[in-house]
Image (cartoon, helix red, strand yellow):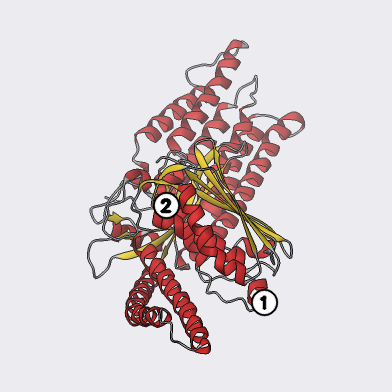
Amino acid sequence: MMRQLSWSAVDDDDPRLLQAAFALLVTLDLAFRIQGGARWDLVSWPVFAVVLLAVVTAATLLLPWDRMPSVMLGVLAVLDIAVIGTGRLSPEGSSIAILLLLPALWLGRYGAVRGAVVCFLAVGLFQALPGLVYGELAGANLSRSVLPALVAVGATVAKASAVQAIGRQQRMSDAIFDTVDVGLVLLGRDGTYERMNRRHEEFMRVGYPDGHDGVAGQTGAVFEEDGSTPLARELTPTFRAMTGEEFDDCRLWIGTDPRNRRAISVSARTVRDEQGDFAGAVLAYKDVTDFMGALRVKDEFVASVSHELRTPLTSITGYVQILQERDDLPEQAASQLGVVARNGDRLLRLIGDLLHAAQADASGPQLERSHTDLAVIVRDSVEAASPAAEAAGVVLELTAPPRLPMCADPRRIGQVVDNLLSNAVKYSHRDGRVQVSLALDGDRAQLEVQDGGIGISSADRDRLFTRFFRTRSAAESTIPGVGLGLSITKEIVEAHGGRIEVESVLGTGSVFRVRLPLER
């Protein structure tokens, strides 16, 4: 079954361990006194202290403290004070009074303000009073009897105040963490679930209906973003977090019952100790079921509308091409048909981009890999872009090897080159220059498209590959576009195992650099 954990503090004061440490210290004091020549009769206060210590320690080790009332901890502290008070009643004296701090702190920890009162009475009865009766009421004996008692009571009050302050802060933290609508989990150094809030307990009941052992990396009714593929252990957020990975917006589905299954977005951050070593991780789980549903509806709508638009538009562009092939058209009509054809082609490209965006949301770019020649693809794209460049007054320059074979989807890679060339021409100034270079860089192909156009600001570069994002300079220059080309280009490049980079200065131009593995 799932471990029930909360944000409340864990009791780290085990009475068994504390009593064992106390008994060891008292035993050491007695051993040192015997080594110094101390001897006691069987009927004496130090012997009584030893017997009482043995009985209390044995009882502490045997009692089931998880079922004992808290008052028993106070009784244990009072008996230890009695051990200290009676153990120091001997002519040779003892420094055992310093150990009063241990039971005094216990009383402050478990009894709060009442513990200070109990400590004052117990120390006065078993420590100060016997010491004053046994010895003189002045000098060193007065100091030995009264000062340890005052220090013990002060320690109890200090501990009680600290416990109250910590408890108040803990209750405030509990209220905050249980109020937020985000599941929160704290993992320990070894991957155990140390804390979780109420919201995450709800997620756990959905994702692990058969129970959870409270250890990172467990699999249950947890699925990948597609909602059907079971999530492998090494892909679970907790397992990834325990390897030191930090991430945001890792989406997954939990549950098998359609009535309560949820989509979750997970983020993780590592926890480091003072030396910078890994000490655990914190994960936040956010319910994004409604958001995922909205995305699905949006994708279905975009795909449906795009298909419905493509069919009549293809027919229109086809008939326009037929008309353009006629030789008896007036010059003005031929020019107007050219405008229709260009805008029809633009609409077809836009619809294709929308369809690609919808398909990528659903399952990522679909690739049909084959052995192809990247140099041929680049040359064909440059040739196809030449008429548009010439019309815009932009010079296209190409530097490429005769052949550059690679394993890729030629249609998708052609789309990457077309998008980069189209943007370079579109955002270049008249009489500008676009330089295209293709080269081999180790086991990767490197494609660069450089222009001297309007450039991109540093603020816009961070969002450049976001869907439907357009830079401010592009919007102000009224250059047409919807902001899909670069996001699609990035998805295709990464689907091939490559990466795309951009260097740009506003008003100077941009360099887009694509690196693609030759074999994968």
Task: Give the CA distance from mark 1 to mark 2.
Answer: 32 Å
In this picture, is 487 found above or below 83? Answer: below
Dots 1, 2 in contact, CB < 8 A: no
| Residue 512 image-quadrant placement | bottom right
The amino acid type found where label 2 is placed reads Ala
Residue 233 rendering spot, x and y as whole percentages = 33, 44
**486, 178: nearer the viewer:** 486
Per the image, label 2 sits on a secondary structure element best described as: helix
Q: Is residue 336 left or right of residue 148?
A: left
Earlier along the polypeptide chain: callout 1 or callout 2? 1
Residue 335 rendering spot, x and y as whole percentages = 52, 84
Residue 153 rendering spot, x and y as whole percentages = 63, 45
| Residue 319 image-quadrant placement | bottom left
Which residue of the protein is positioned furthest toward the right in this rendering? 139
Residue 511 seen by the camera: yes
Residue labelled with disc 1: 477
The amino acid type found where label 1 is placed reads Ser
- Which label sits in the foreground, 1 or 2? 1
Residue labelled with disc 2: 495
**147, 263: nearer the viewer:** 263
Q: Residue at x 63, y 79 (%)?
A: 478
Residue 86 rendering spot, x and y as whole percentages = 55, 30
In this picture, is 240 found above or below 127? Answer: below
Q: Is residue 509 left or right of residue 380?
A: right
Per the image, label 1 sits on a secondary structure element best described as: loop
Q: Residue at x 33, y 53 (%)?
A: 368
**46, 164: nearer the viewer:** 164
